[in-house]
Image (spheres, rainbow, N blue to C red):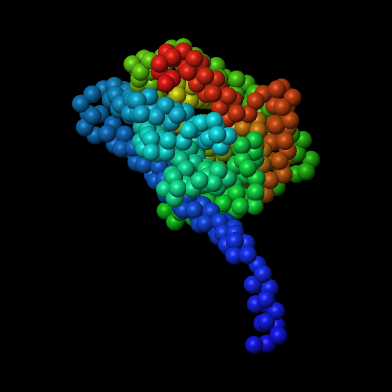
Amino acid sequence: MTKREKIKRSLLAHVPKDTINQFLSKDRTPISVLFMSLMVGIFSGLVGTYFEVAVHFVSETRTEWLKSEIGSSLPLWLAAFIISAALAFIGYFLVHRFCPEAAGSGIPEIEGAMDGMRPVRWWRVLPVKFLGGMGALGSGMVLGREGPTVQMGGAIGRMVTDIFRVKNEDTRHSLLASGAAGGLAAAFNAPLAGIMFVVEEMRPQFRYSLISIRAVIISSMSACIVFRMVRGQDAVITMPQYQAPEIASLWLFLALGVLFGVLGVVFNRLVTISQDLFTRIHKNDRKRYLITGTMIGGMFGITLLYMPELTGGGIWLIPNITNGDYGAGFLLLLFVGRVFTTMMCFGSGAPGGIFAPMLALGTLFGYAFGVTVKGIYPELDIDPGMFAIAGMGALFAATVRAPITGILLVIEMTNNYYLILPLIATSLGAVVVAHMFGGQPIYSQLLHRTLKNEKLRQRDLPKDAHS
C-alpha cells in the first residue's frame, strides 16, 4: 500500500458514517427531483397535446353533425343550438357536480396551491377539466385551452408527488410549479414562455432555488418535445414574418402600449363584474347554474353559424386579421363584440381559460391601430401586422402583469423574432400605465375572489357542517 493510499484510508476512517450517508442522500435528492420533473413534463405534454386534439375533434364532429343527419331533420339554427347546448351542459355539470375548483381558468387554483391555500384534488381535476373543457370549448364558447392545461399540468405534478409519496414540501412545491410550466408550454408550443410564466407571473408563490428552476426548465422542455412529436414543430400561429421596423416608429408602439395599459385595467375590472353578475343570477344553485350555462352554450352554437368571428378562443382568427381580411372599423366593432362574449363565457364559470381570448383581442385592437397609423403616416415603412403582434403581448402584459412572459409567448407562437424591440416597447408602456391606474394582475385578482367567496361560504354553513 502506498503512502497516499494510507493517508486516504486514515482520513476516511475518521469521517463518521452518518456524514457520508447524509452527503449521499443530499446528492441523490436533486437527481430524484429532476427525474420526477421529467415525468411531470412528459405527462403534462401528453395531456395538454391530446386535450387540444380532443377539443379539435369535438369541434369538427359538431360541424359534421350539423351537415348530416341532425341538420337535415331540424332547422339549422335549432340543430346548432341543441348540439352546442348539450356540449356546454357536459362542462358545466361536471364542474358543479364533481369539482368546483375546475371552473374557470384554473391558474388561480394552482397559484393558491403553491401558497398552500387551495387543495389539489388531482383525481377529480384531471378528468373533470379534460372532459368538461372538451364540452365547453367544443361548443364554440369564447374560451382558451391554456388555463385548463396549466391546471391539469399542476395536478399532474401533485399526482406524481403523491404516487412517489414525496413528503418534502419544497419538492412538492417544485413539481407543482413544474407541471404548470409544462402545461403552458404544451398549450402554445412555447417552452421559454412556460418557464418564464412560473418564474415571473407566479413569483409571489414560486420558491426560487437552483433545484426548482431546473425542475421547471426540464418539465417545460419535455412537455414541448412531446407536443412537437405529436403535432409537429411549426409555430402555433402561421403569420407573415416581419422585419424590424424603423427606429423612428418605436414611439408609436409605446403609444399603443399606453392604450393597452388602460384597456388592461378595464378588462380586468369587467372580468370581476361579469363573475359577480353570473353569481347573482345562478346563486350557486345547480339547476340555475346548469340552465344558465346551457343557454349560453346554445347561443354560441347559433352565433357560430352567422358570426363565427365572435366565437371560439380566437387563435384561428389571428392569421385572418394580420392578412388584412378586415377593415379598421370592423376590427374595432369585432373587438367590442369579443370583449362582451369573452366576459359572458368566462364570467359564467365554464371550464376554460382566458389566455387565447386575450391574445385575439390584442391582435384586433393592435391591427386596427396599425391601419390607422398607416393612414396618418404613410411615409413610415411599417405593416399593420406588426402592431397586431405587439398588441398580443401588450394586452397580456397589462392584464397578467408578466411582460417578459408575454413577449416570449408571442415570439414563440408567431416566430417573429425581429419584432422583439417593438414588443418590449409596447409591453413596457402597457405595464407602466396599468400599474399607474392601480389595476391588479388578473390571476391574483381571481385568486383573491375565490378565497373571499370560500370564506363567505364557510361562514354561511351550519356549525355541524364544519365538523
The quadrant where residue 121 appears: top left
- Name which residue lies at 50% across and 21% down: 454
Task: Mark yes or no: residue 161 visible.
Answer: yes
The mark total stands at 0
Pick whichever, 320 or 355, lies toward us.
Answer: 355
Q: Quadrant of the C terminus?
A: top left
Pick whichever, 174 or 415, lies toward us.
Answer: 174
In the image as oriented, which residue stretches furthest toward the bottom? Answer: 1
Task: Mark yes or no: residue 88 visible.
Answer: no
| Image location of residue 88, percent across then percent down | 36, 27
In the image as oriented, which residue stretches furthest toward the right? Answer: 248
| Image location of residue 308, percent across then percent down | 43, 29
462, above or below 192, in the image: above
19 relative position to 425: left or right = left
Pick whichever, 116 or 355, lies toward us.
Answer: 116
The quadrant where residue 13 appears: bottom right
| Image location of residue 333, percent across then percent down | 55, 22
